Amino acid sequence: MAILTEVISFKDVSLNFGGVQALKNVSFDIKENSLFAIIGPNGAGKTSLLNCINGIYKPTTGSISIFEKDSKELHPDEIANLGISRTFQNIELFENMTALDNILIGAHRHVNYGPIRSLFYSKKVREEEKKARQISENVIDFLEIEEYRYSFILSLPYGIQKRIELGRALAMEPKVLLLDEPAAGMNNEETEDIARFILDIHEELGITVILIDHDMNMVMDIATEVVVMDFGEKLFQGNPADAARDQKVIDAYLGVS
């Protein structure tokens, strides 16, 4: 049986913004090939954890290891190049560009040519652009959005826009995918679709997924492990079934003692 390695490790991480403490002495490890969910009430510090992983924030104290590298020594683009990609709570797409163009932005990480070659559209540039286009087309097929390939983002339904943002992150061909509330604002059918794609990404593509979402039914159905946050502190870490029965978790969500 293969031993799963740690891809990300939090050690006593605290994050302060002036007098506000967003995270307090948070420690946990995320293993390779896990579908790891971070849950908790609003303001619990969930998005702050993701922002620390991809380098938007640097811990005030403690350390974060990403593929055994200290995140404090890495810029966000360097973390992305290690194989970390993400989506955001609010859709961050270019509305006046097509679905394909938005996904191609994610594939840009794989192209390798400079401004001079680009100016003359050399053979190398053409080959690299062809490679990026093939990556993007594979993502479009995987997410079943072929019919929206040339549609402008402004004209597309909300659920499809969320899927395209997921596609842009996938086009980076990540080792670890960070999903910040991928089902937020979706109806039941759209939520079921996005949950299916998350499972396929995890199981078929073998990508480690770190998921934040408020839809507890979805999280409990698909996650292999959960961390529960409340007011910047870790309340619980373990399997979803145990989290649902843990009294501290229940109190955090229901506001009772």
Image (cartoon, helix red, strand yellow):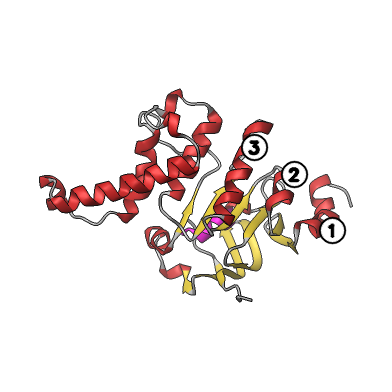
Q: Say which quarter of the image contains residue 232.
A: bottom right
Mark 1, residue position? 246
Q: Marks 2 and 3, how far apart in space?
A: 10 Å
Residue 140 appears at what percent x and percent y? 44, 40
Identify the amino acid type marked 3: Thr
Residue 220 appears at what percent x and percent y? 74, 50
Mark 3, residue position? 191
Residue visible at 41% across and 66% down?
Answer: 74
Mark 2, residue position? 217
* Horizontal arrangement in the rendering, residue 95 relative to residue 237 (left or right): left
User: Magenta stretch?
Assistant: 48-55
Q: Nearer the viewer, residue 86 or 59?
A: 86
Label whose residue precedes the other's in the sequence (2 or 3): 3
Q: Nearer the viewer, residue 199 or 82?
A: 199
Q: Nearer the viewer, residue 197 or 248?
A: 197
Near mark 2 (Cα within 10 A), the count class, few <14, some 14-19 or many ≥20, is: few
Identify the amino acid type marked 1: Asp
Q: Secondary structure at mark 3?
A: helix
| Residue 42 located within the stretch drawn in magenta | no
Label whose residue precedes the other's in the sequence (1 or 2): 2
Identify the amino acid type marked 2: Asn
Q: Marks 1 and 2, how far apart in space?
A: 16 Å
Residue visible at 38% across and 39% down?
Answer: 102
Residue 56 against residue 8 in the figure, above or below:
above
